[in-house]
Image (tube, grey):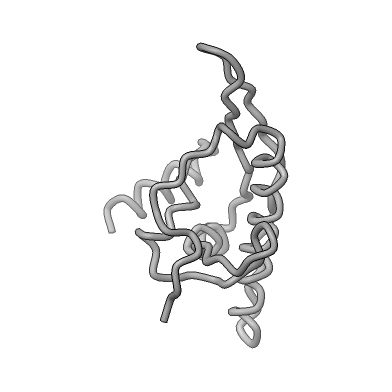
Amino acid sequence: MNTILRVKDLIEAGEMVAVMGDRADLDTNLASVKFFGEQAYFPTSLYLLSAAMACPILLTVSLYRTPNHYDLYCEPFAEKVSLPREDRKAALAAYAQQYASRLEHYCRMAPYSWLNFYDFWSARS
C-alpha cells in the first residue's frame, strides 16, 4: 500500500513512473487476447492503476541492435484510461489487446530482442 501511495504522490507532482506492465505471472488480473494469432494472457492491473490515478500511459520499448546499442521507442498508449463500470472487463481486454498488438509490432522489428521468462500461452483457469 505504501508503494501505491508513493506512486500517487509522484504522479500528482508531475513525475513519470515506470511500471513493468507485462509481468503476467505477478498479476492476477488477466485478459485473454490474440498475440501472433494465438490466445495469450496479458495483465491488466496497469490499466486499473492508470484509471484510478487519472494518468496517461506511455509505451516504452528498447530493442537491442548491436553490442552496446539499443533503439528506444516511446509512444503515447492511452491519454486517459476509461473503464466503464457496466463493461469494465471488455474495456480492460481492449487495452490488453492494444498492448499485445503494439508488442507484436516491435517483436517483428527485432525478433531476437525478446526474452520471455513465463509461459505466455499457458492455459489459465
Q: Decide: is 40 above or below 69.
A: below
Q: Decide: is 3 above or below 95.
A: above
Q: Depth check: 75 or 125 in front?
A: 125
Query: Quarter of the image containing the N terminus?
Result: bottom left
- Percent across and percent down for residue 115 are 47, 40
For this view, does 79 lie left or right of residue 13?
A: right
Q: Decide: is 69 above or below 85.
A: above
- Percent across and percent down for residue 47 are 55, 61
Q: Residue at x 62, y 71 (%)?
A: 93
Extreme-bottom residue of the structure: 86
For this view, does 96 lie left or right of residue 1?
A: right
Q: Depth check: 10 or 73 in front?
A: 73
Extreme-left residue of the structure: 2
Please tell me how many numbered marks the rendered image carries.
Answer: 0
- Percent across and percent down for residue 107 are 65, 41
Query: Quarter of the image containing the C terminus?
Result: bottom left
Extreme-top residue of the structure: 68
Q: Residue at x 51, y 36 (%)?
A: 15
Q: Residue at x 52, y 37 (%)?
A: 16
Q: Depth check: 81 or 97 in front?
A: 97
Q: In terms of image quadrants, where is residue 25?
A: bottom left
Q: In terms of image quadrants, where is residue 100?
A: bottom right
- Percent across and percent down for residue 60 are 60, 37
For this view, does 92 lie left or right of residue 3?
A: right
Q: Residue at x 49, y 70 (%)?
A: 30
Q: Depth check: 43 or 77 in front?
A: 43
